[in-house]
Amino acid sequence: MPLSVIVSFVVVFALMLLAVSMALKFFDARRKKQVADMLDMASGETKVSVSNLLKELEPERPTGIKRLVASLQFSKHAAEQIQQAGLNWSPTRLIAAMGLMAVPGLGIGSMVPFLLNGPVTAIVLALVFGGLPYFIVRQKRKKRLAALEEQFPEALDFLARSMRAGHAFSISLEMLGEELADPLGQEFRALFNEQNLGAPLDLALRNFASRVPLLDVRFFTSSVLLQKQTGGNLSEILSRLAYVIRERFRLKGQVKAASAHGRLTATILTLLPVFTMLALLVVAPGYLQGMAQDSDGKWLIGGAIAAQVLGNFFIKKIINIKV
C-alpha cells in the first residue's frame, strides 16, 4: 500500500477521533447546562421575558470568522435534526456512526482508485460513506415533518371544536394529545406536559415551534399568543387557520402536478448516464477501461460526475416551488 494512502488514512482517522472527542465534551456541557436551567426554573429564580409579537427583533447574526466557527458546532445541529426526526439517538451516536461508515470508504477508495489517484478516491468515498447516516436522519426528518404538516389542520379543527364546547385551551391541548395519533399527538402531549409542569404558555409554545419547524406551527403559535395579549375568538381564528392550511395543501398539489414533468426529466437525466455506463461495461468490458486508466480520462470522469451532480441540484432547485 502506498505511503500517501497510509498517511491520508491516519490523518482522517485522527480528525474523526478529535471530532468525536469534541462532540462528547460539548454534549456533556450542554446536558449540565440543561439540568442547571431546570433547577433554576424549579426554584423560581429564572425570569422569563415576554417579547412583543407584533414586531420581534431577530438577534444579531454572526458574520465572518464567528459565523464559520458557529457553523462548525455540528453536535447542536445534529441534536436538532435527530429530535425533529423522532429518533432516540444522541449526537455522539450519529457522529460515531458517520466515523465508522467513513472507514470502509477509505478502504474501498484505496483499493479501487477510480478518481485521479488513491488518496483522492479514498477521501471522496470516505466523505460519501460517512454522510450516509446523516442522510438517513435527514430523510426521516423530512418524512416526519410531512406527516406532522398533514395532521396539523385536523388538530386545529379539534382545538376549535373543543373550545366551542366550553373547554379551556389547556384542557383542549390535553384532549388533543390523547386523541390525536402520533407523531403530532406526541408533540402536543409534550406541549401540554411542559405547560402543566409550570412553564409559561408563551415559552411552551415557542419550544413547540422549535421542535416542529413548520410555517403552519409558527402561524398557530403567533395566533395563540396574539389572542392572549389582545383577546378575541380563538376558536374562530383556529378554524380559519385550518381552512387556509388546507387551501395551501390544495395549491401545493396543483403545483406538484404541474412540475411532475420536470421531476421526471431530472430522474431520467440523472439515471441515464449510469445505466449507459453499466450497459457498456456488460456489452464491451474494455471500452471504458482505457479512459479510467488514462490520467486525462480520470479528470474527465471526475468532471462528468461533478457536472451530473450540479445539473441534478439545479433542476431540483428550479422545480421546487415554495407554496
Image: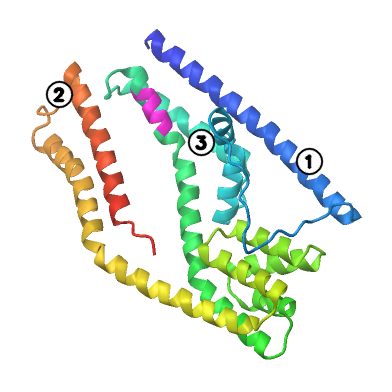
User: Which quadrant would residue 246 be assigned to in this image?
Assistant: bottom left
Amino acid carrying label 1: it is Lys
Is 233 within the magenta?
Answer: no
* Residue 183 position within the rendered picture, expressed as x and y whole percent measured from the top left: 57, 66
Most extreme residue toward the front is 55
Q: Are marks 2 and 3 in contact (CB under 8 Å)?
A: no
Q: Which residue is mark 3?
A: 98
Task: Please state the extent of the stretch shown in magenta in the rendering.
Answer: 121-127
Q: Secondary structure at mark 3?
A: helix
Magenta span: predominant SS is helix
Q: Secondary structure at mark 2?
A: helix
Camera-nearest residue between 241 and 143: 241
Q: Which residue is mark 1?
A: 32
With respect to residue 264, does 291 lie above or below? Answer: above
Residue at 72% of width from left, 64% of height from top? Answer: 202
* Residue 110 position within the rendered picture, expressed as x and y whole percent measured from the top left: 36, 20
* Residue 55 position within the rendered picture, expressed as x and y whole percent measured from the top left: 62, 59
Residue 186 visible to an observer of this rendering: no
In the image, which is nearer the foreground, mark 1 or mark 3? 1
Q: Secondary structure at mark 1?
A: helix
Residue at 30% of width from left, 67% of height from top? Answer: 255
Q: Which residue is mark 2?
A: 291
Which circle's residue, 2 or 3, is located before the other in the chain? 3
- Image quarter where the C terminus lies is bottom left
Which circle's residue, 2 or 1, is located before the other in the chain? 1
